[in-house]
Amino acid sequence: MYYSSLRFATLQGMHNWSISSQEHIHNDRCGQEFKNLNCNKVYIRGDLDTPKETQYFLKKENIPNRLYKGIGHWYMVENSGNLYDDINSMMENGIEQWL
């Protein structure tokens, strides 16, 4: 739903969203919220467009992450076969294999 919504978004709508979202991402707020979740978690990312700041934060905070090479932000579309196979494996065998 999110992906299709973006495809139909107007340029002005996307600009407004980018401006209004700044208060929510300032000072690594999203990263800190993710880090502070009280459960096992893995940050899934592609290497084509993960910002250097995000890569640094993941390393600095020792956050488990799964890198898919040659994949951008839409890994669930660009890499759906591998991603969902990995998620199924994690569900069957436990998240420990990713930590």
Image (cartoon, rainbow, N blue to C red):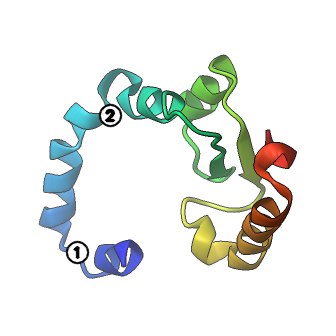
Residue 50: x %, y % from top left: 58, 45
Front one among 71 and 36: 36
Q: Are marks 1 and 2 in contact (CB under 8 Å)?
A: no
Taking 31 as reference, is 93 above or below it? below
Residue 49: x %, y % from top left: 58, 50
Q: Helix or strand or loop: what does disc 1 sit on?
A: loop
| Residue at horizontal 62 percent and vertical 66 percent from the top | 75
**Could you tell me how many numbered marks the image carries?**
2
Taking 65 as reference, is 71 above or below it? below
Marks 1 and 2 sit apart, C-alpha to C-alpha, by: 21 Å
Residue 71: x %, y % from top left: 68, 62
| Residue at horizontal 58 percent and vertical 39 percent from the top | 39
Q: Which quadrant of the structure image shows residue 19?
A: top left
- Residue beneath disc 1: 9
Amino acid carrying label 1: it is Ala
- Residue beneath disc 2: 25
Query: In the figure, is residue 71 to the left or right of 2?
Result: right
Mark positioned earlier in the residue sequence (1 or 2): 1
Query: In the figure, is residue 23 to the left or right of 5?
Result: left
Q: Helix or strand or loop: what does disc 2 sit on?
A: helix
